[in-house]
Amino acid sequence: MSGQRQLHLGAFMRPVSIHTGAWRYPGAYPDANFNYKHLKYFARRLEAAKFDAFFMADHLAVLNMPVDALKRSHTVTSFEPFTLLSALAASTTRIGLVATASTTFDEPYHIARRFASLDHISEGRAGWNIVTTPNPDAALNFGYESQMDHDARYVRAREFYDVVTGLWDSFADDAFVRDVEAGLYFDPAKLHVLDHKGPSLSVRGPLNIARPIQGWPVIVQAGASEPGRQLAAETAEVIFGAEATLESGKLFYADIKARMHRIGREPDQLKILPAAFVVVGETIEAARARRAHLDSLVHYDSGISSLSGMLGHDVSGFDPDGPLPDIPETNASKSARERILRLARDQKLTIRQLAQKAGSYSGLAFVGTPTSIADEMEQWLIEEGSDGFNVMFPWLPGGLDDFADKVVPELQRRGLFRTEYEGATLRNHLGLQRPANRFFAPDSASELVEDTRRARALH
């Protein structure tokens, strides 16, 4: 199987499990989402299994659900992503560290500075998951009375990306000469002032941090709507997708890669990693029993709140054992909304059944033995449904340990996953090029610095 494509694997770690019953599962750490010692163990465990990245989602509101649901949620308290990932950078050496940061409620200078810092602290392992925040409760935390509409959020996000990447290019790679004898710290000819003035943003610059080790931290995106797909095709280097079937995955994969080709981007410079909820058992029946028990731990109060959030419409007042009524368009995430509406339509599920699925994760799931899970993952890779997966663990630490101890070795045996890291940066792991500085052409000195850095990474 020499020369075959290999899977890329990210780990979805905030919350540590997307499943609202995860903290109640026998043997789970109930405080796993907010216990640094546990999270440090998880990161090291994932690194030992050679995962590409540790990924943190983020939420900007607590009161985004009724208190009856909130009191049952293990995500009510979570670490701020940059603080945690900076700490984990000191406890790991190879695994990528991807943080979510919103273009809706933050400022480009803040985001550029934080990610540049994380990239330097981690020696080139940072990634930025670009999100537009749809939650109206988050808007209230930032001085807004209502949420920006869906398309406007994506227009701002596109300009935001241009500003942040422009700020990362403020200094040439070889700008900092640090000539002690001459008393020259940096070469002013290697400094660029962005002076951006656009429809949504005005940012002078330059950034007060040297260019990131990776040039730019890896750009990650998750939107599946039409504006989200176009933004990803233009900007993303990784997509955390939400396709629940191989057929829909193949359509999404082909669409994104075709969009990239049309605008002149190399399709292999973007990796598509759909979220995959993985439950491992000694037999398929045992794995299914584990999933069923886990799902039974989802309280209705929690499930109905998750369902209302996905739909962008409160459905708690409807008959739980009746069908889902027609739901008007909202500013909620369109991909999540369509997924749950499709389930309601195709499987004729009641609101109670939909609530349980919403609370237990309704997307792509691999439930089976290490062999059957590897078979499914291999099929997605071969048939171009994905370039890998963003793995969601059913509970912690058991679900993570099962995957690392049983599924990863099976993937490695088939030549589908690395046995060792080949480089030190997240770009190395993903096979992504280091972006050129848009304002300064590389010279022999900067190329020598980068070549030296890469040589050290390989050793």
Image (tube, grey):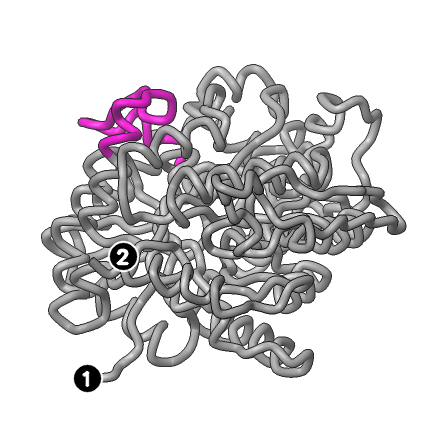
Residue 172 image offset from top left, x and y in percent? 59, 56
The residue lying toward the viewer, choosing from 201 and 356, is 201
Q: Say which label, 2 or 1, has the lower sequence index.
A: 1
Residue 180 image offset from top left, x and y in percent? 48, 39
Mark 1 secondary-structure assignment: loop
Residue at which label 1 appears? 2
Position of residue 59 relative to residue 164, above or below, is above
Residue 362 image offset from top left, x and y in percent? 46, 49
User: Is residue 139 in view?
Assistant: yes
Q: Is residue 29 left or right of residue 17?
A: left
**Neighbourhood count class around disc 1 (C-alpha, 10 Å): few under 14, some 14–19, many 20 upward:** few
Residue at the (37%, 59%) spot, across then down: 389
Which quadrant, please, contains the C terminus?
A: bottom left
Residue at the (30%, 30%) spot, across then down: 39
Q: Which residues are magenta?
A: 19-41
Which disc is residue 233 wearing? none
The residue lying toward the viewer, choosing from 322 and 408, is 408
Q: Amino acid at mark 2?
A: Arg
Position of residue 41 relative to residue 347, above or below, is above
* Total tally of numbered discs in the picture: 2
Residue at the (64%, 63%) spot, across then down: 440
Residue at which label 2 appears? 456
Q: Amino acid at mark 1?
A: Ser
Residue at the (54%, 69%) spot, across then down: 443
Query: From this viewpoint, which residue is outermost toward the front?
Result: 181
Which quadrant, please, contains the N terminus?
A: bottom left
The residue lying toward the viewer, choosing from 285 and 249, is 249
Q: Is residue 16 left or right of residue 412?
A: right
